[in-house]
Amino acid sequence: MSDEQNSVSDLLEDNQYKYGFTTDVESETFAKGLNEEVVRAISKKKNEPEFMLNFRLKAFEKWKTMKEPAWPNVHYPPIDFQDISYYSAPKKKKQLASLDEVDPEVMRTFEKLGIPLDEQKKLANVAVDAVFDSVSVATTHKKKLMEQGIIFCPISEALQDYPELVEEYLGTVVPVGDNYYAALNSAVFTDGSFVYIPPDTISPMEISTYFRINTEETGQFERTLIICAENSYVSYLEGCTAPQFDTNQLHAAVVELVTMDNAEIKYSTVQNWYAGDKETGQGGIYNFVTKRGKCAGENSKISWTQVETGSAITWKYPSCILQGDNSSGEFYSVALTNGHMQADTGTKMIHIGKNTRSSIISKGISADHSSNSYRGQVKVGKNATNARNYSQCDSMLVGDKCSAHTFPYIETANNSVQVEHEAATSKISEDQLFYFESRGISRENAIEAVISGFCKDVFKQLPMEFAVEAQKLLTLKLEDSVG
Amino acid sequence: MLEIKDLHAGVEGNEIVKGISLSINKGEIHAIMGPNGSGKSTLAKILSGHPAYETTAGNITFEGQDLLEMDAEQRSIAGIFMGFQYPVEVPGVNNAEFLRMAHNARRVNAGEEEVDPLDFDELLSEKMKMLGMEKKYKERNLNDGFSGGEKKKNEILQMAILEPKLSILDETDSGLDIDALRIVAEGVNKLRSENNALILITHYQRLLDYIKPDFVHVLSKGKIIKSGDKALALELESQGYDWVTSSN
């Protein structure tokens, strides 16, 4: 049996992590280590306004007093935060006036990743901000968006051009001392994306950021802030890859979303960070991310969709604070773990306003020696009359050495609330695949059909191209794990 | 069409089939009968290409090709259909979509274009009408929550879509009440032609009241101990398997 499977996977070159290459660019990298001087140096490097420096210093003071969380169901050796470089940027001589001045190697890297950035080849209907290690290197379609008053730029640029907007919202959803990694991020983040959708505006295209970690032993700490004003809408996509290194790299991002009255943000992620060696578990990204949205206005909506297929360790709970009356939050997730990956992911839905609704659809797929945990919290405050939540958490096991765990937490302080929780565990079995094969359907197509069936409710939330890519990614990753 | 020569086979090192030879031509229906443990289902598994079962000696050819060199997928494409005794449930995969995948796998192999869902729906509706099947078979997920009878009917629907040259129905009658048995058997009869062949593997002769075999073979302890025509099945029915196993 295993012979047969090997021959199948041998045919598929793509089975390798195809984004594992590194790019040879001249970088400016800070010496390893973290102290107040480093925090000040980052702020200075970025020529930041004073409020920003104070924000960082406050976060750094908090961070020094905090401890890494021990509650997630993941295991790893202690991280030496003094052994990481907190700033790395492709070297440039002066401020870039146009894309022509971006290091061609960096441009080629993104092209190789399927994200062409230059004017001729850029994607027609998606505006892209490309973040390479610690800095944003290019943002497309900026002008076209600006015609409608939409601001889409690197957050470092927003700090120069729209400091009052950044100051008003930064840290309002994820406070500087929210958790260990968020505090670290707040102190040392170097770039990320900033989006502002003015009132009564539907963004004419998808907005996306593509993250690439290139340098070994550099942490990536990006910060994303998206504000959607009254009666506006934006759909935002995020993609990530990293080269293959034997050492672990830290990725500790913070994403904050704010929606005003009747506004909606749809945030989709396909995460494919390098997950480490499949056999030994060596290397890979530690993905410790804080993502949170605040439905500040009435009737507003925030929807998170994530397809998590990479990283050695994932620790991530995209959440919604449902503050405005009648606001709603959604969380759709597919988390796949294989090899020696560990994921502890889920969501928090905090109901504060009246008639707030939330739904959670989580699909965990575990294969090989991996461990996959869903952790979700539904919290309903005493003023959240008629709040409703529906949660469905399904797990699929592939093989018998992996594990799946579900940790739902429900807290309600209001009697008019309805909370439903459903959970199921299934297996993709050799018998199922044999059944497909005996009808002339290839093993690959069979896995794709079973997985996409399992993940249907989540995939249909993704923009079309993303859904197709996500499905292929999952199939490739599971190809030689079934049996 | 199918030529089995001195087949020895088993699972996990236990030899269960101990020298079977059988020749099947197009247009023929063969019934293979036998008590539990006689090797019927091992034979079915071997013919279907189940990876857990292994052949230790002998050979099988299908239209001149070495069947044992082909995997389950290739066998299906070549025109062999296995109607399973226990069809597996596949939650999340729509039945109509599954049938379209199977249909298209054949078309792609023959160098033809894939059929889109709308065109396929026409073909599917036509076959379902012929078999007298309800619409729910399109809408539900593959065998998911189907009763025993529904699963068997669904196997026959797959057979109708795939139009195989050789169908092997493994204990298709087991677990069916008399009405379901009749519907399934009628379906099989409608799919018969002089160009295809059928192997019915069954414990009881009652299926043979509905699908009339040209040949009946009795299997015992991994060997065919008696072959005959339909009369043999009736005799087994009245006398029991002891009659053949002890007289041999």
Image: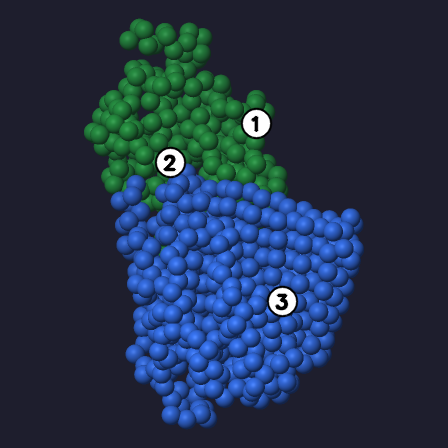
User: Sequence order check: which comes first, mark 1 or mark 2?
Assistant: 2
Q: Colour of chain B?
A: green
Taking A47 as reference, is A336 above or below it? above
Tell whether A462 sits left or right of B14: right
Which of the chains bears the disc numbered 1? B
> For the residues carrying marks 1 and 2, which lies nearer the camera in this image?
1
For the residues marked 1 and 3, what is the alpha-carbon distance in whole angstroms?
55 Å
Residue carrying label 3? A293
Residue A470: x and y in percent read: 47, 61
Task: Say the numbered circle drawn on residue B180.
Answer: 1
Residue A134: x and y in percent read: 43, 77
Q: Colour of chain A?
A: blue
Q: Tell if the residue under mark 1 belongs to the same chain as the one under mark 3.
A: no
Element class at badge 3: strand
Q: How many numbered callouts? A: 3
Task: Say the numbered circle drawn on residue B169.
Answer: none
Q: Quadrant of residue A195?
A: bottom right
Task: Say the numbered circle drawn on residue B166.
Answer: 2
The residue at 52%/72% (across/down) is A61
